[in-house]
C-alpha cells in the first residue's frame, strides 16, 4: 500500500485530509460568503480564513510534503453559484505570468468549505500529469462567463482520462503544483465554496521580475 506522500508523488494528488467536521466547515462557508465570487488572499481580509489556514491538520499535511517552514505564496476563496457560467480551464498552479514555484518545495491545498461534487463543479484532474513538468500556456478563449480570460495550459493528447475529485465539506486535498486540473460550472441549487492555497517552503518562489516574493508565513521558524 502506498503512503500518503507516495500517493501524491505517483498520482499528483491525494484526498482525505480532515480539518473540521461538516457542520463547522459549513458555518465557516456561511461566514465568508458575500465578499465576491473570487477573493484573492482571503486570509488578509477574512478572520475565519486567517484562522483556517493554520489548522493543525492542514499544516501537518503540508509539512509532510515540503517541511515545517510553510508560507502562503497565493491563493483565493472561490464561490461557484448555482447556474452561473463559472468554469475554470485546464491549468497548473505552479506557473503563471510572473512566477514559477519549485515543485519540490511547494504544494497546493484545496479546502472544501461545502462539499465539492461532480454536479456542483468539483475539480477534474489528470492523474500523473505532474510528471510532464510545466507546460505551455495561453489565454483561454472567451466563453461568456464573468471572470475574464484565464491563463490556461495546453493539455497534451494521448494522456490519461480526467477524473473527478469529490471532497466532502471539512476535508481537503493536496495537489502537486504541476498537476493539470480544471473545474466545470455548478449545476446544483446550492453554492459550492472552496479555498485554494499555494503553500511554499523557503526558496520555492521565482519571480520573473526579479523582485522578492510577498509571502504569508503560517508555520515554522525560518521566516
Image: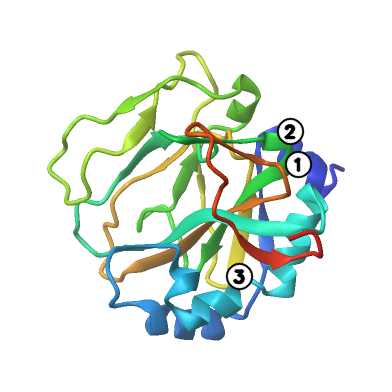
First in sequence: mark 3 vs mark 1 = 1
User: Which residue is at a point 20% across and 29% down the rendered structure image?
Assistant: 141
Crowdedness of circle 3 by 10 Å Cα count: few (<14), some, many (20+)? many
- Quadrant containing the C terminus is bottom right
Q: Is residue 114 visible?
A: no
**Mark 3 and 1 residues: CB-CB less than 8 Å, in contact?**
no
Q: Which residue is mark 3?
A: 53
Q: Position of residue 17 (x, y in %)?
A: 69, 63
Residue toward you, 34 or 70: 70
Please, what secondary structure does the residue beneath circle 2 have?
helix
Camera-nearest label, 3 or 2: 3
Gap in angstroms between the C-alphas marked 1 and 2 = 5 Å
Q: Which residue is mark 2?
A: 10
Camera-nearest label, 3 or 1: 3
Up-down: is 155 above or below 174? above
Up-down: is 126 above or below 50? above
Query: Looking at the rendering, which quadrant does residue 179 occupy?
Result: top right
Query: Horizontally, is 46 left or right of 130 in the view?
Result: left
User: Which residue is at a point 56% across and 48% down the rendered structure image?
Assistant: 213
Residue toward you, 175 or 59: 59
First in sequence: mark 3 vs mark 2 = 2
- Quadrant containing the N terminus is top right
Residue toward you, 151 or 8: 151
Q: Which residue is mark 1?
A: 7
**Mark 1 and 2 residues: CB-CB less than 8 Å, in contact?**
yes
Up-down: is 151 above or below 81? above
Q: Position of residue 14 (x, y in %)?
A: 67, 48
Amino acid at each position: 500500500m502506498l503512503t500518503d506522500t507516495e500517493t501524491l508523488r505517483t498520482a499528483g494528488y491525494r484526498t482525505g485530509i480532515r480539518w473540521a467536521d461538516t457542520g463547522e466547515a459549513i458555518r465557516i462557508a456561511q461566514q465568508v460568503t458575500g465578499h465576491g465570487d473570487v477573493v484573492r488572499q482571503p486570509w488578509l481580509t477574512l478572520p475565519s480564513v486567517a484562522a483556517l489556514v493554520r489548522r493543525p491538520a492542514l499544516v501537518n499535511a503540508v509539512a509532510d510534503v515540503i517541511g515545517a517552514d510553510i508560507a502562503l505564496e497565493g491563493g483565493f476563496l472561490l464561490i461557484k453559484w448555482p447556474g452561473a457560467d463559472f468554469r475554470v480551464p485546464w491549468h497548473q498552479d505552479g506557473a503563471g505570468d510572473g512566477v514559477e514555484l519549485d515543485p519540490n518545495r511547494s504544494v497546493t491545498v484545496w479546502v472544501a468549505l461545502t462539499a465539492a461534487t461532480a454536479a456542483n463543479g468539483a475539480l477534474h484532474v489528470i492523474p500523473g500529469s505532474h510528471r510532464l513538468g510545466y507546460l505551455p500556456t495561453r489565454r483561454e478563449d472567451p466563453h461568456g462567463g464573468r471572470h475574464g480570460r484565464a491563463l490556461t495550459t495546453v493539455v497534451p493528447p494521448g494522456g490519461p482520462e480526467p477524473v473527478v475529485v469529490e471532497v466532502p465539506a471539512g476535508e481537503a486535498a493536496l495537489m502537486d503544483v504541476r498537476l493539470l486540473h480544471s473545474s466545470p460550472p455548478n449545476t446544483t441549487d446550492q453554492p459550492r465554496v472552496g479555498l485554494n492555497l499555494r503553500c511554499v517552503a523557503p526558496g520555492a518562489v521565482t519571480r520573473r521580475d526579479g523582485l522578492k516574493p510577498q509571502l504569508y508565513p503560517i508555520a515554522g521558524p525560518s521566516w
